[in-house]
């Protein structure tokens, strides 16, 4: 049983490292779509909404912070980048902020290292 668990964890780590983007910046090629989640209390399930047409900086890297505004009655906050994953020309930019860990922006992108 232990070798099976070890094998599964190894494969998961390989997949994670292949999908994760570390170091270099990405360049968004489209407006983003943000998923904003609220978790009002520990017993309630999360409430997430998607907002389209999110304007993004021309270059984004791990650790960056930029203002995100969304909604028809604009709301916003400083989005701190915790992790970027690239798959097939689409970047998922995950928040690194404690209160917004489930927030994610998806955007068409190019890897700046290319």
Image (cartoon, rainbow, N blue to C red):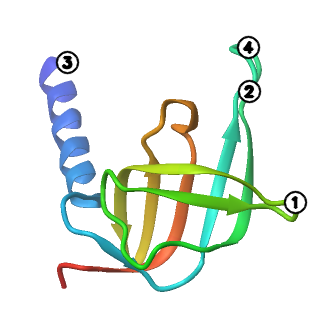
Farthest residue in the right direction? 73
Q: Residue at x 56, y 40 (%)?
A: 102
The residue under label 2 is 45
Judge by depth and name the residue closer to the eye, 88 or 48: 48
First-in-chain label (2 vs 1): 2
Could you say whether the residue bearing mark 4 is in a helix, strand or loop?
loop
Could you say whether the residue bearing mark 1 is in a helix, strand or loop?
loop
Q: Quadrant of the N terminus?
A: top left
**How far across and down, in percent of the image, does residue 60 sit?**
37, 67
The image's mark for residue 1 is 3
Distance of label 2 from label 4 (alpha carbons): 7 Å
The residue under label 4 is 43
The residue under label 1 is 73
Farthest residue in the left direction? 3
**Is 100 situated above or below 59?**
above
Distance of label 2 from label 1 (alpha carbons): 25 Å
First-in-chain label (1 vs 4): 4
Q: Residue at x 36, y 58 (%)?
A: 84
Q: Residue at x 26, y 43 (%)?
A: 12
Q: Are marks 2 and 1 in contact (CB under 8 Å)?
A: no
Could you say whether the residue bearing mark 3 is in a helix, strand or loop?
loop
The image's mark for residue 61 is none
Q: Are marks 2 and 3 in contact (CB under 8 Å)?
A: no
Density class for disc 2 (Cα within 10 Å; few <14, some 14-19, many ≥20) is few
């Amino acid at each position: 049983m232990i070798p099976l668990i070890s094998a599964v964890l190894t494969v998961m780590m390989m997949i994670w490292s292949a999908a994760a983007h570390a170091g270099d910046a990405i360049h968004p090629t489209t407006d983003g779509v943000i998923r904003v989640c609220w978790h009002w209390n520990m017993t309630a399930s999360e409430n997430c909404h998607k907002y389209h047409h999110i304007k993004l900086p021309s270059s984004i890297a791990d650790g960056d912070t930029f203002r995100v505004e969304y909604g028809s009655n604009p709301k916003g906050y400083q989005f701190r980048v915790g992790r970027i994953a690239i798959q097939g020309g689409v970047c998922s930019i995950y928040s690194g902020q404690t209160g917004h860990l489930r927030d994610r922006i998806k955007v068409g992108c190019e890897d700046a290292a290319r």
